[in-house]
Image (cartoon, rainbow, N blue to C red):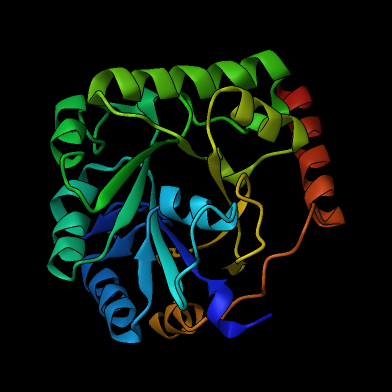
Amino acid sequence: MSPQTLVPVLLYHSITPTGAESRDPFAVSEAGFREDMEAVQASGRVPLTARQLGACLRGEQPLPEHAIALTFDDGFADFADVALPILDKLSLSSTLFMTTGYFDQPGMLSPAALRDIAADASLEIGAHSVTHPHLDLLDASKQLKEAVDSRKHLEDLLGMTVDSFAYPHGSHSRRTRSAIAEAGYINAHAVKNAISHQTDDCLAVARFTVVTDTEREQVARVIGATGAPISWKGERLRTRGYRLARRLMAGARS
């Protein structure tokens, strides 16, 4: 596979002053995030939104050489206060996947704040479900409801089409992908902690999660498409085993 067709897709959650004060293992410090974004800019990679990347994966438009995508899950308030100003200063486009049931919760975006930042031409707003469940543990009707309701909420709020989705926890199955497609999404992001590429599944795009303890050197390697494996087709046996374990645990708690 040509290095020019590899597409690192970075996944962030909360960006805070130190990355530690929130006690969230997914929080990244403002200084660390700025260093990551400066590395993206210096790399010469072309930032794509989820919608733009999906169009390339479907062959609707050419994939730029040395592309990259920057994504943010859940809808933390610090995306607007901390992350977006850094992205705008460096002219980097991005995608924010919003969990609609998190609106107005402590530390999360309000509907008004999301509406304000949605006016940023370099930002795409995507959906991330209503309640942030492991979708692959739900029956088909509940999966579809999470996908449909979150999309409708965002479209009604923003007055724009929402056609990109990110699976909560990265959890999905063939049935989940079918529900996402039925709900009208044409792009969906998973996790995998791998590097996406030109032939990746547009309904299961691989991403690499950056967390509190991720070293900046590793992020730099991922930006260079060398710090993680290249995404694979289908599910690995380990993924199926993990799903079975989660189902058993969920059954034991019910």
Residue 130, picture quadrant: top left
| Quadrant placement of the C terminus | top right
Position of residue 210 relative to residue 114, above or below, is below
Residue 165 location in percent, x, y?
49, 38
Query: Relative to residue 7, is residue 237 drawn left or right?
Result: right
Indicate the position of residue 218 as horizontal and vertical percent values. Answer: 48, 81
Residue 174 locus on image (x, y percent):
76, 36
Q: Is residue 126 above or below residue 150?
A: below
Q: Is residue 113 left or right of residue 2?
A: left
Write down the quadrant of residue 205 in the picture: bottom right
| 45 left or right, relative to 172 | left
Q: Is residue 17 visible?
A: no
Is residue 114 visible from the viewing direction of this image? yes
Tell me the residue at 63%/83% (across/down). Answer: 2
Residue 87 image position (x, y, % from top left)? 21, 63
Please state which of residues 206 and 80 is positioned toward the viewer in this rendering: 206
Q: Which image quarter is the N terminus in?
A: bottom right
Who's the residue at 60% across and 64% down the image? 193
Residue under the point 65% across and 42% down: 171
The quadrant where residue 158 appears? top left
Query: Total marks drawn?
Result: 0
